Structure formats: structure tokens, C-alpha cells
């Protein structure tokens, strides 16, 4: 079991890359509109083209989905999506965006959000990695775990591109490996301070 101490975890940070938008849509559809938590999202996206990502996500969610302006206050029942070509971090109760150097060859990158949330909110944070290539987000999961937060990855067997969740499993010894339906239930439970199961601890063909 995870969260056996029944601490309310009310800051969720979610990262994905290839295949991550589809996973995120599925996840948001299953989350309650009255979720007592804030959600930050980084999806690797092109810096050159406008997209309808926020509109697309909003159609699948009862939560408010937005791209934050710099310094926007973080509130429950909101999903903050990193704008294209800008990193997003959580600091001092605000979502802040900036055009710092690319990380993992991309901007926005997942690690800046995860690491900043760990520093700002400590054990209240839950870090989640969805489908994607590469290892962006792994350092962030390690930072979250170091601050006694919870780390979760999408089951690689379900992910369209499993290397990002597999990297989290290899390097972070994540708290839970879950399919999307179980992940949505876990998010709601953790936000209300309930303990949840950890799912099968599977990796690239090996248990960890």
C-alpha cells in the first residue's frame, strides 16, 4: 500500500511525450470535477505551431484546464498545462513560465516542473509519468521521492511508448505502476488522503 499514513496529496504533476496526450485524455475523463487538488501537466510539444491542446483537454475534463500566465496562483480543481516553448514550474503557490535552456532537447520539459513541485510542496506532491520516449521526468520523480512525495508511472504494457515509464521504474523504484483506469482512482484517493494499492511492480520484462 502507498499513502498508508493517509496524508492528503493535493498537488499532482504529470508528464508525457509520444502517446502522452492520448493517455492524458483518458485520465482526465475519469477524474472527478470536484477533485480537491491542483494538477500541473507537461507534454512535449512543438515550439513552432499553435495547437488546440488546452481546448482538446478541456473537452475531456470537468476540471478547469488552462495555460497559466507567469505568476498565476495555483488552485484546486485546475489543470495547468505548460505553454509551448516555455518551461513551467511551481513556486511560492504560483505557476511560473520561462524560456530557460532546453532540457532533454525540449522546452517545455518535465523535470523542471517535477523538481520545482517537490521543493515547493514536499510530501503533498504526486509525480506521474505517462507514455513517452526518453528519460525526461526520471530526475523529477527522484526529487519527489526524496521529499517524501508519491511517484507513479503508467504501466509500460499499456503505454504506446513505454521507455519513459520504464526509465522511472529502473531509476526511481516508483511507488506504483498502474494502468490508466486504476491511476485515475488512485489520484482521487490520494487527493482525499486515502491509502491505495501499488499495482504490479513491473519493468522492462523484469520485476523491480
Image: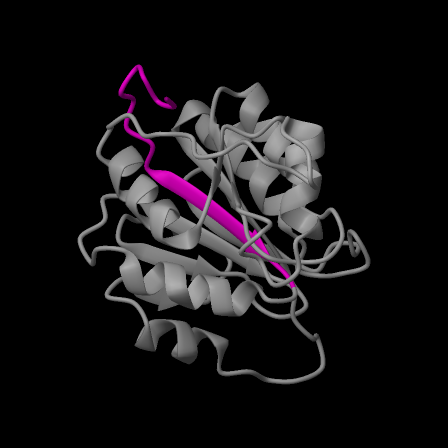
Seen in the image, is 146 located left or right of residue 34? right
The residues colored magenta run: 1-17
Q: Residue at x 53, y 31 (%)?
A: 118
Q: Quadrant of residue 64?
A: bottom left
Q: Going 53% across and 47% down the picture, which residue do you hit?
A: 155
Nearer to me, 18 or 9 = 18
- Tell me the residue at 48%/46% (across/down): 13
Q: Position of residue 104 (x, y in %)?
A: 79, 53
Q: Does 88 appear above or below 18?
A: above
User: Can you give x and y, in whole percent of width and height, for residue 47 in the image?
Assistant: 70, 75
**Residue in the foreground of this view, choosing between 42 and 174:** 174
Q: Quadrant of the N terminus?
A: top left
Kindly give the residue lying farthest to the front in the view shown. 205
Relative to 42, residue 196 above or below: above
Q: Quick check: 94 left or right of 169?
A: left
Secondary structure mostly taken by the magenta-highlighted segment of the chain: loop
Q: Say if the magenta span includes residue 187.
A: no
- Seen from this angle, which residue lies furthest left? 34
Taking the view exactly as shown, the residue that stands out farthest to the top is 5
* Res. 68 visible in picture: no
Q: Is residue 5 magenta?
A: yes
Place of residue 168 in the rendered image (x, y in percent of width and height, measured from the top left): 65, 38
Whether residue 23 is visible to the viewer of this picture, yes or no, is yes
- The picture quadrant where one finds residue 60 is bottom left
Q: Residue at x 69, y 75 (%)?
A: 46
Task: Give whichever of 27, 205 is nearer the camera.
Answer: 205
Amino acid at each position: 500500500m502507498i499513502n498508508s499514513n493517509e496524508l492528503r496529496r493535493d498537488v499532482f504533476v504529470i508528464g508525457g511525450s509520444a502517446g502522452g496526450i492520448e493517455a492524458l485524455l483518458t485520465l482526465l475523463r475519469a477524474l472527478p470535477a470536484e477533485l480537491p487538488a491542483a494538477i500541473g501537466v507537461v507534454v512535449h510539444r512543438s515550439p513552432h505551431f499553435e495547437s488546440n491542446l488546452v481546448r482538446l483537454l478541456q473537452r475531456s475534463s470537468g476540471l478547469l484546464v488552462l495555460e497559466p500566465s507567469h505568476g498565476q496562483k495555483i488552485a484546486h480543481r485546475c489543470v495547468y498545462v505548460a505553454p509551448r516553448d516555455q518551461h513551467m514550474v511551481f513556486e511560492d503557490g504560483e505557476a511560473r513560465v520561462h524560456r530557460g535552456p532546453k532540457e532533454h532537447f525540449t522546452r517545455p520539459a518535465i523535470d523542471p516542473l517535477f523538481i520545482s513541485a517537490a521543493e515547493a510542496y514536499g510530501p503533498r506532491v504526486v509525480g506521474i509519468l505517462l507514455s513517452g520516449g526518453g528519460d525526461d521526468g526520471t530526475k523529477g520523480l527522484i526529487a519527489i521521492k526524496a521529499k517524501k512525495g508519491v511517484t507513479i508511472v503508467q504501466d509500460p504494457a499499456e503505454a504506446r511508448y513505454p521507455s519513459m515509464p520504464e526509465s522511472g521504474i529502473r531509476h526511481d523504484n516508483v511507488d506504483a505502476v498502474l494502468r490508466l483506469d486504476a491511476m485515475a482512482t488512485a489520484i482521487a484517493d490520494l487527493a482525499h488522503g486515502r491509502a491505495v494499492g501499488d499495482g504490479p511492480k513491473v519493468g522492462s520484462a523484469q520485476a523491480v
